[in-house]
């Protein structure tokens, strides 16, 4: 049995009275999840919509609690870190992580960044040792597969695309993914939303089809997922 962690981050709902306002990233991710569940109904499924229910931003008190030895933390400090502990436990338990995110101002939503800030934590998801020289941080988790589902109003943010230098969403997710324990990454992208033309309709349809086919492929090979060690761009 595998554990699937699903994180949505759009502030929009998946279904709205006006379908034009439906979240594209959530609906594409839902196609992946529904297909996975059909193939592997026994798997554990953990879901968080951080777009609608955002985690708290970290504070000075949060940082102080993190750097206080666990045995010396006050009840208030333990409470400050309670959400972080829960989110880290969910990531640690996951074999497959699905993160769906719209591109807001060329990067990730603040709510999704807040989720990462609660999780990327010394002694929990990484350690620090100056004996490593210029690269003292080392992730503590490994063996996980990440599916990144994104949507954008413009297009051409991929490597070699006409807006490559403006696309900070996927590069940021890739950089932070190592602290989730990710070894293998797949991307599903829908573009052209602001244009509202045939290119957009085709892009969304292709993204949903890719999400479904990718879920079928990975769910059938799920027992082997944790043994993959190389990041891919399949």
Image: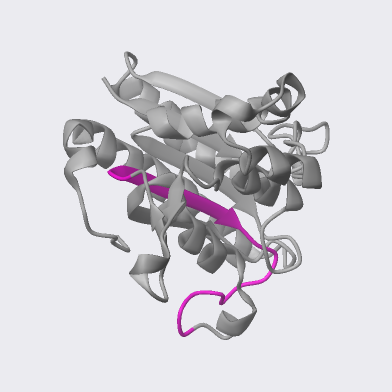
Provide residue 174's location: percent of width, then percent of height.
46, 61
Work out whether 68 lies above or below 151: above
Provide residue 196's location: percent of width, then percent of height.
72, 62
Boundaries of the magenta span: 142-160
Q: Is residue 24 visible?
A: no
Q: Report the front residue among 126 and 13.
A: 126
Q: Is residue 44 visible?
A: yes
Provide residue 85's location: percent of width, then percent of height.
57, 29
Work out whether 216 lies above or below 151: above
Task: Identify the residue at horizontal 48%, vertical 36% (top origin).
Answer: 31
Colour style of the rendered protein structure: one colour
Task: Identify the residue at horizontal 77%, vertical 42% (top origin).
Answer: 11
Query: Is 109 positioned to the left or the right of 217 in the image?
Result: right
Q: Report the front residue among 184 and 93.
A: 93
Task: Identify the residue at horizontal 57%, vertical 46% (top origin).
Answer: 100
Q: Is residue 173 magenta?
A: no
Query: Is 143 positioned to the left or the right of 187 in the image?
Result: left
Quarter placement of the C terminus: bottom left
Extreme residue toward the top, this view: 42
Extreme residue toward the right, this view: 17
Work out whether 42 lies above or below 104: above
Query: Is 200 positioned to the left or the right of 11 in the image?
Result: left
Task: Identify the residue at horizontal 43%, vertical 37% (top origin).
Answer: 32
Q: Is residue 153 magenta?
A: yes
Image-quadrant location for residue 41:
top left
Query: Is 91 positioned to the left or the right of 55 in the image?
Result: left
Provide residue 153's location: percent of width, then percent of height.
70, 65
């Amino acid at each position: 049995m595998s554990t699937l962690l699903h994180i949505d981050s759009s502030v929009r709902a998946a279904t709205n009275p006006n379908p034009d306002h439906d979240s594209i990233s959530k609906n594409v991710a839902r196609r992946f999840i529904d297909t996975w569940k059909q193939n592997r109904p026994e798997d554990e499924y953990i879901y968080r919509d951080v777009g609608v229910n955002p985690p708290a931003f970290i504070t000075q008190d949060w940082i102080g609690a993190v750097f206080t030895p666990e045995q010396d933390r006050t009840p208030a400090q333990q409470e400050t870190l309670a959400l972080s502990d829960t989110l880290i436990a969910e990531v640690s338990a996951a074999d497959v992580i699905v993160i769906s995110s719209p591109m807001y101002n060329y990067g990730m939503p603040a709510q999704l960044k807040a989720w990462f800030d609660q999780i990327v934590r010394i002694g929990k998801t990484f350690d620090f040792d100056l004996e490593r020289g210029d690269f003292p941080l080392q992730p503590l988790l490994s063996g996980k597969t990440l599916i990144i589902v994104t949507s954008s109003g413009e297009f051409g943010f991929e490597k070699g695309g006409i807006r490559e230098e403006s696309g900070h969403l996927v590069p940021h997710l890739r950089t932070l993914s190592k602290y989730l324990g990710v070894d293998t990454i797949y991307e599903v992208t829908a573009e052209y939303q602001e244009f509202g033309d045939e290119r957009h309709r085709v892009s969304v349809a292709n993204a949903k089809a890719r999400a479904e086919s990718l879920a079928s492929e990975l769910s059938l090979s799920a027992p082997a997922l944790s043994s993959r060690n190389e990041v891919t761009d399949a």
